[in-house]
Image (cartoon, rainbow, N blue to C red):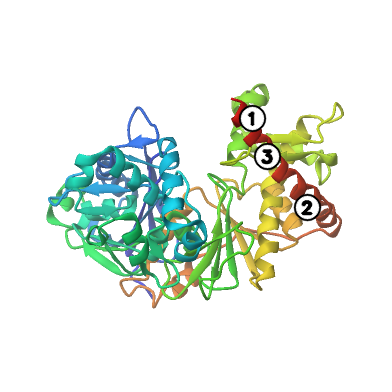
Amino acid sequence: MPPPSACFLGIDVARDGLSLVILSATGEVIATLERSYSTNPGPTTDPQDWWRAARTGIKEILRRSGKPANAIRCIGVTGDSTGVVCLAKDGRVLCPTVLGADVRTGAQVEQLVRTVGLRNLLNLASGPATESSPAVKLLWLRDNERRVWHDTAHLLQPKDFLRFRLTEALATDPSDAAATLLFSPRGRTWSKQLLTLLDINPAWLPAVAAGQAIAGRVSTDAARETGLQAGTPVITGASHIASVAVAVGALQPGAAMIELGGEGSFFMPTADAVRDPQGRLISTCHTVAGTWALAGSGFASGGAISWLTDQVLTAEVAQARRAKRDPLDLLAELAAEVPPGADGLLFLPPGLHTIAGFVGLSYAHRRGHLVRAVLESGALALRQALDSAAEIKRRPERITVTGAFAGNTLWCQILADALDHTIHALPCGNSSAIGAAMLASSAVGIHKGIEEACAKMVKTKGVHHPRKAATEAYSSLLPSLARFSPAAARTAAALEATA
């Protein structure tokens, strides 16, 4: 049995702020804390803001928990995979970073694809180049910030920078490294071919280790600034999506995770670096040694939900908030009045090369139809992705839904019906930080390994089974969706050409 006082700290460097959690050895959440980075949030952030938030946040969460610093046996870190931090030889941050898409980098996306070749890139790296890819952002820095490029000695992603400030150790894990497009998922090492083609110095890149490996220990300076005990071990950690997978126990082939909230991520561990022939899911690495994954995002319609609450159903949402109700519960009530398939209404969410729209909208459709179509859109897209994975004989045996919206019964039922698969729900708004803390618990002998940690700490709270009639209704919509999505892309291209 683990010591009753043993606790683990998980820290998530997210786009909109820092999330911290202290977890007991049995998986009990002892304390949580959210810290914003600045009073003027935006896509461009100073990595030092993450450290400032961590310094004050760690002190505050220790105070809230009532635990002494020596109760924290190990620390786990996670974060957004799209940022890249350039450090000088002395560890100084050389420039701000952009989390998410950097709209300035369109030319660099084209340049990377032209230099490497699209087919070659898909074979060498974990997916296509986008404005969010760290490799693309590095090319932009090379082209536009020559002084920064000249002075760079180290490249780190957000979680790795935070660990560097805690321990002075330079490291990363396979799940974050794969997101850079400079890493070979198949070989689980930095790609010499990609680095050569893009003229990126391999000496800038950190060593790669499994997420639960101890990368360093809290330094004396960091202990003084945070209130932690000097010498506390800090693990390598994992990307946001891999940490969420750990939080629900999706460690090995046969398991899968859906995150309802944010970008709506999907993550399915695999035994090898298999690729989705349809390109709906990317091939990447799990943070767990010897495990890969098929992964994707954009399946939860989070942006569309925000559009409904902030722009369309504002009066209803205001009324719900006055009654101290979750606005999503109100949306679910409206959608529940509408049958599966939303009486022929389809929602096509926006993408990098498509415009959003409702297909089949008529005067007979009501507010609930709009909501239901939005909720169903991500589920149908995920069904297409799973059908594609099934073509290469990769099928999940157990699917767990987590995230801020995983407690919504209707949304989970829509997923179960659309996917024709039983859904296990684990509602949690800070799953990534919890996953990081769970990884930490497996690194210091409290648990024999991450599998044992998950077996003891993961506790799902609901099960949703598919209903035959609803599944048939959703299956009948898939051919229409397959036709309309390419049409939306062509329409977007035509509109852009005339703009």
Q: CA distance from mark 1 to mark 2?
A: 26 Å
Let me know if residue 295 appears in the view. yes
Residue at figure coordinates x 62%, y 49% from the top left: 299
Quadrant for the C terminus, please: top right
> Three-letter amino acid code at disc 1?
Leu
Q: Position of residue 155 (x, y in %)?
A: 27, 53
SS type, badge 2: helix
Nearer the observer, 297 or 127: 127
Q: Which residue is mark 1?
A: 495
Q: How many marks?
A: 3
Nearer the observer, 30 or 277: 277
Q: Position of residue 316 (x, y in %)?
A: 68, 25
- Among numbered discs 2 and 3, the one appearing first in the sequence: 2
Few, some or many residues within 10 Å of mark 1 (<14, 14–19, 20+): few
Disc 1 + disc 3, Cβ < 8 Å: no
SS type, badge 3: helix
Quadrant for the N terminus, please: bottom left
Q: Which residue is mark 2?
A: 478
> Three-letter amino acid code at disc 2?
Leu
Task: Using residue 266 as the reference point, say whether residue 444 is left or right of it.
Answer: left
Q: Position of residue 45 (x, y in %)?
A: 33, 37
Residue at figure coordinates x 45%, y 43% from the top left: 131
Q: CA distance from mark 2 to mark 3?
A: 19 Å
- Among numbered discs 1 and 3, the one appearing first in the sequence: 3
Task: Using residue 375 as the reference point, say whether residue 236 is left or right of it.
Answer: left
- Among numbered discs 1 and 2, the one appearing first in the sequence: 2
Q: Which residue is mark 3?
A: 490
